[in-house]
């Protein structure tokens, strides 16, 4: 496929030759993430806004994800389905320790504790 791109000077053109292979590996993390993003960012009913981020549809994340999906060689108009991943995920209802609720006081205490663990620096030498 040939793409014509205008260069700076009048009448000059640059031809970019694109090979028949995809730019992005279909099994790559980038392609999988783009498929996830385009599956999440869909129009919410007839309102014309994205149901995920609230921007007008097609929102920028959906547009960019579709570009990556197309670059990976997938049909951009087809509904996308992720192949099964080799990643083991922890279910949401897994038993275990619940993280403590973050409050402003806990955040301040954690920052103070972190500051006390850091060795004092020579301010002149750090600049």
Image (tube, rainbow, N blue to C red):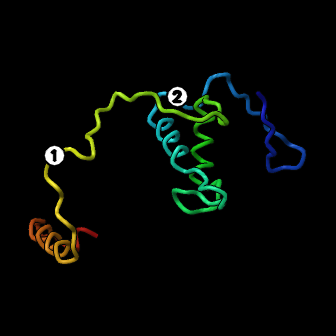
Does 72 appear above or below 109?
above
Near mark 1 (Cα within 10 A), the count class, few <14, some 14-19 or many ≥20, is: few
Residue 8 in percent (x, y) is at: 80, 50
- x 44%, y 35%: residue: 29
Q: Say which quarter of the image contains residue 73.
A: top right
Which one is in front, 11 or 24? 24
Q: Relative to residue 7, is residue 126 drawn left or right?
A: left
Which residue is pictured at 85% across the width and 42% down the height? 12
Could you tell me which quadrant the C terminus lies in?
bottom left
Q: How much space separates mark 2 and mark 1, taking CA atoms?
A: 35 Å
**Camera-side residue: 124 or 80?**
80
Image position, residue 53 (x, y; %): 52, 60
Residue at the top extreme, as displayed: 20
In which quadrant will I find the N terminus? top right
> Which of these two is toward me, 16 or 74?
74
Q: Does residue 11 sit above or below 108 in this rendering?
A: above
Residue drawn 28% across the image and 33% down it: 88
Residue 55 location in percent, x, y?
59, 62
Disc on the earlier residue, 2 or 1:
2
Query: What residue does disc 2 label?
Result: 26
55 up-or-down from 81: above or below: below
33 relative position to 106: left or right: right
Instruction: Verify CB contact (< 8 Å) between mark 2 and mark 1.
Output: no
Q: Quadrant of residue 70?
A: top right
Residue at numbered disc 1 = 95
Q: Is 123 on the left-hand or right-hand side of 37?
A: left
Q: SS of the residue at dot 2?
A: loop
């Amino acid at each position: 496929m040939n793409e014509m791109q205008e260069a700076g000077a009048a009448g000059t053109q640059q031809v970019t030759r694109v090979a028949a292979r995809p730019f992005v590996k279909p099994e790559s993390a980038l392609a999988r993430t783009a498929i996830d993003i385009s599956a999440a960012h869909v129009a919410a009913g007839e309102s014309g806004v994205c149901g995920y981020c609230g921007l007008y549809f097609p929102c920028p994340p959906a547009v960019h994800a579709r570009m990556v999906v197309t670059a990976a060689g997938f049909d951009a108009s087809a509904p996308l389905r992720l192949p099964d991943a080799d990643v083991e995920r922890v279910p949401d209802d897994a038993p275990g320790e619940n993280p403590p609720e973050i409050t402003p006081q806990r955040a301040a205490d954690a920052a103070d504790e972190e500051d006390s663990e850091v060795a004092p620096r020579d301010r002149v030498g750090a600049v």
